[in-house]
């Protein structure tokens, strides 16, 4: 959370604002309901050729977000990683495919 005028704005671990300015209790409830499970979900990264690549978050800090190509857990393929700035840029979004 971060203070905002007379209230607080809820910010997730990727640096995305989840609410506008709300009271403390509403902010706490929003944080609790958001949880951290979304970090294990697949994401999509817009890569330089203009296509979307399915990725997984492997590391998260206040300095950077590291993602890797989702290889389904295969151990016999090269790991392809991307380092992104924090907060999360628009080119990283929750996976929308099936």
Image (tube, helix red, strand yellow):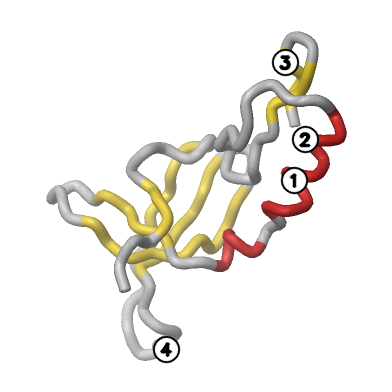
Q: Name the residue tied to disc 4.
A: 75
Relative to residue 52, is residue 20 drawn left or right? right
Residue 58 drawn at (x, y percent) = 54, 63
Instruction: Name which of mark 3 and mark 2 comes first in the sequence.
Output: 3
The residues tagged by marks 4 and 2 sit, at their Cα atoms, a distance apart of 41 Å
Mark 4 / mark 2, whichever is N-terminal: 2
Q: Nearer the viewer, mark 4 or mark 3?
A: 3
Q: Nearer the viewer, residue 33 or 53?
A: 33
What residue would you read off at disc 3? 4
- Mark earlier in primary sequence (4, 3): 3
CA gap, disc 1 to disc 2? 6 Å
At a point 37% along the width and 38% down the height, the residue shown is 90
Is the Cβ of the residue at disc 1 closer than 8 Å to that at disc 2? yes
Per the model, the C-alpha gap separating discs 3 and 2 is 12 Å
**Front: mark 4 or 2:** 2
At 69% across and 21% down in the image, what residue appears?
21
Of tags 3 and 2, the one toward the viewer is 2
The alpha-carbon separation of the residues under discs 4 and 3 comes to 46 Å
- Using a 10 Å C-alpha cutoff, classify the residue at mark 1 as few (fewer than 14 neighbours), some (14 to 19) or many (20 or more): some
Q: Nearer the viewer, mark 4 or mark 1?
A: 1
Residue at which label 2 appears: 27
Residue at the extreme right: 25
Screen quadrant of the N terminus = top right
Q: CA distance from mark 3 to mark 1?
A: 16 Å
């Amino acid at each position: 959370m971060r203070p905002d005028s007379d209230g607080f704005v809820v910010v997730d671990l990727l640096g995305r604002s989840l609410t506008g300015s709300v009271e403390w209790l509403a902010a706490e409830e929003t944080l609790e309901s958001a949880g951290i499970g979304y970090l294990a979900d697949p994401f999509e990264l817009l890569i330089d050729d203009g296509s979307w690549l399915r990725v997984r978050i492997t590391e998260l800090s206040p300095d950077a977000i590291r993602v890797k190509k989702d290889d389904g857990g295969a151990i016999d393929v090269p790991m392809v990683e991307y380092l992104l700035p924090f907060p999360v840029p628009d080119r990283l979004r929750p996976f929308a495919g099936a």
